[in-house]
């Protein structure tokens, strides 16, 4: 009998569930005997909590975007919200989810949103689950809400983000950067003539794909107005998502301009992979999934209305990579598109840059690594969490932290895997000095420490690492020392 695999997302927008679906597709064929389930955690919560997590967020984005950006940056240091009331609100409203997960009793859990990742991590810490936990980020930059303890593997979207995680103390063997999981087929050849014919698009004329996102962004109307005044020959496909009112409004706008032959207006469609592969340019917001899909398809982007926080950072990366341009003025979007369509060599360079950034096999790589994880997770002590948070707030790399706050990695000598992050102050209590290469954990000694309030966290960490053993010896690695398999 195979393993039970659970893929968890949260329906805040569409990206997290799309990534979860891509991971599920990546699992196909890897282990035929495994049972795989996928769940949107918000579908198990009450309507009020669901609206708080989803609808309220997008209302803030529309009405006070600066507040969303401030909140994103404020939560950037990992573990900063560990003592926040938000944690108790989440636990109170996810009782049904916890019950369902315990009933399924998975062997492998893969999370594409930080909410289920935090809850599963807590269940593992309390020994309510014996599953492995892997965390899959869905934006190009790291954000502190995603990091939890314990976990088995953390997937970053790009190499620099992986290097950043190493710089703040996460052992390198616990991080990889496969990219953001995207739907299959984006990098495969496409029958362009057939796709154009299906959507009523003429051959030889550039196609501009304008996306309002799954929810249907109102900014799309302004983009279409701008496009109607462009001078360079083009045809467009406008995807309005599930916003029927927006679709009707744009259809009237296109009809009034007499451009029905040049512009196709769609609602929600499952043909985005085909449309991306026949288009010359994508116009829309730099969400993590839409951006990574464009990159996988080699499709240059014109970025509009990025949400402060993650989308602004996504935009920065895409611009740096040469695969996108950004429109800072709502009234010059058409001009920007016109300039790009008139410069075919620049479009070709941008498409090449996009293909270089794209990771069409990310879902498969995430699935493969998740199934190969060893049983022991990485435990980050509370003291180490506080040290990491302070280092990030101070802009100091873990290597440069001073004194008792310096982080040390504990490694299992029998597997070569990192198993814990602790501070030098905690190790000193156990008699470990700066030059020490190992530490011996003894159950009786740790039990005695539990009665000392200042050492309770250390005792809990040690007891977790013992896991019913009477004693255990672990390697101690200095900051920045590479983890090598024995």
Image: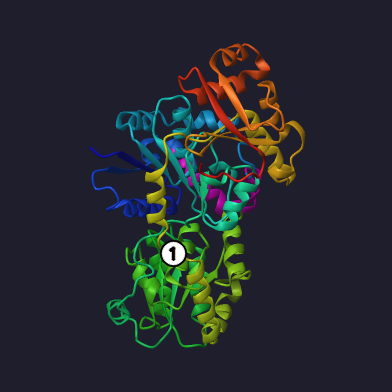
- Read off the residue under disc 1: 293
Is 428 situated left or right of 345 in this image?
Answer: right
Vertical position of residue 187 compared to residue 172: above or below:
below
Vertical position of residue 64 compared to residue 315: above or below:
above
Vertical position of residue 255 compared to residue 7: above or below:
below
**Residue 286: image location, x then y, percent:** 53, 62
Q: Residue furthest right?
A: 403
Q: Which of these two is toward me, 178 or 477?
A: 477
**Residue 170: image location, x then y, percent:** 59, 42
The magenta stretch spans which residues?
50-75
Who's the residue at 41% across and 86% down the image?
Answer: 205
Is 263 situated left or right of 310 in this image?
Answer: left
Give the quarter of the image for residue 343. Answer: bottom right
Q: Assess disc 1: are there few (<14), some (14-19) or many (≥20) residues with their C-alpha within 10 Å of its C-alpha.
A: many
Q: Is residue 53 magenta?
A: yes
Q: Is residue 43 visible?
A: yes
**Residue 447: image location, x then y, percent:** 57, 13
Q: Which of these two is toward me, 268 or 170?
A: 170
Who's the residue at 36% across and 40% down the image?
Answer: 43
Q: Is residue 346 magenta?
A: no
Give the quarter of the image for residue 426. Answer: top right
Query: Predominant secondary structure in magenta?
Result: helix
Q: Which of these two is toward me, 33 or 81?
A: 33
Q: Quadrant of the N terminus?
A: top left
Q: Is residue 251 visible?
A: no
Give the quarter of the image for residue 80. Answer: top right
Q: Secondary structure at mark 1?
A: helix
Is 170 situated left or right of 44 in this image?
Answer: right
**Residue 314: image location, x then y, percent:** 57, 60
Q: Residue furthest front?
A: 486
């Amino acid at each position: 009998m195979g393993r039970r695999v659970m893929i968890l997302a949260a329906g805040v927008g569409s990206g997290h569930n799309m990534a979860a679906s891509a991971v599920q597709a990546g699992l196909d064929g890897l282990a035929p005997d495994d049972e795989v389930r996928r769940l949107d955690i918000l579908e198990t919560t009450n309507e009020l909590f669901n609206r708080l997590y989803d609808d309220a967020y997008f209302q803030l984005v529309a009405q006070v975007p600066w507040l969303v950006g401030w909140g994103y940056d404020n939560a950037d240091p990992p573990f900063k919200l560990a003592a926040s009331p938000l944690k108790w609100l989440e636990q109170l409203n996810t009782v049904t989810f916890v019950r369902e997960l315990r009933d399924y009793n998975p062997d492998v859990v893969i999370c594409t949103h930080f909410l289920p990742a935090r809850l599963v991590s807590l269940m593992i810490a309390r020994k309510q689950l014996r599953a492995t936990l892997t965390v899959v980020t869905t934006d190009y930059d790291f954000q502190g809400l995603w990091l939890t303890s314990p976990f088995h593997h953390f997937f970053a979207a790009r190499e620099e983000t992986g290097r950043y995680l190493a710089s703040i103390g996460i052992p390198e063997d616990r991080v990889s950067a496969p990219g953001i999981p995207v739907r299959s087929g984006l990098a495969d050849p496409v029958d362009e003539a057939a796709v154009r014919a299906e959507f009523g698009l003429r051959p030889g004329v550039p196609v501009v794909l304008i996306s309002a996102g799954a929810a249907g962004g109102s900014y799309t109307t302004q983009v279409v107005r701008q496009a109607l005044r462009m001078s360079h020959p083009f045809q467009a496909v406008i995807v309005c998502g599930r916003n029927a009112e927006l679709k009707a409004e744009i259809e009237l706008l296109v009809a009034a301009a007499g451009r029905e032959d040049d512009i196709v207006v769609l609602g929600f469609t499952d043909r985005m992979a085909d449309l991306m592969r026949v288009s010359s340019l994508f116009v829309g917001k730099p969400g993590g999934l839409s951006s990574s899909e464009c990159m996988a398809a080699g499709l240059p982007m014109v970025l509009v209305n990025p949400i402060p926080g993650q989308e602004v950072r996504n935009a920065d990366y895409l611009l740096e990579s040469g695969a996108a341009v950004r429109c800072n003025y709502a009234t010059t979007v058409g001009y920007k598109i016109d300039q790009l369509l008139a410069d075919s060599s620049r479009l070709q360079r941008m498409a090449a840059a996009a293909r270089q950034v794209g990771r069409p096999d990310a879902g498969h790589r995430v699935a493969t690594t998740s199934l190969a994880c060893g049983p022991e997770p990485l435990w980050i002590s509370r003291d180490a969490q506080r040290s990491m948070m302070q280092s990030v707030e101070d802009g100091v790399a873990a290597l440069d932290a001073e004194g008792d706050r310096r982080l040390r990695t504990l490694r299992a000598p029998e597997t070569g895997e990192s198993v814990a992050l602790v501070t030098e102050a905690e190790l000193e209590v156990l008699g470990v000095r700066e030059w020490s290469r190992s530490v011996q954990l003894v159950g009786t000694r740790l039990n005695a420490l539990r009665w000392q309030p200042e050492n309770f966290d250390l005792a809990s960490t040690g007891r977790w690492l013992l896991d019913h053993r009477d004693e255990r010896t672990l390697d101690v690695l200095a900051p920045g020392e590479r983890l090598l398999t024995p």
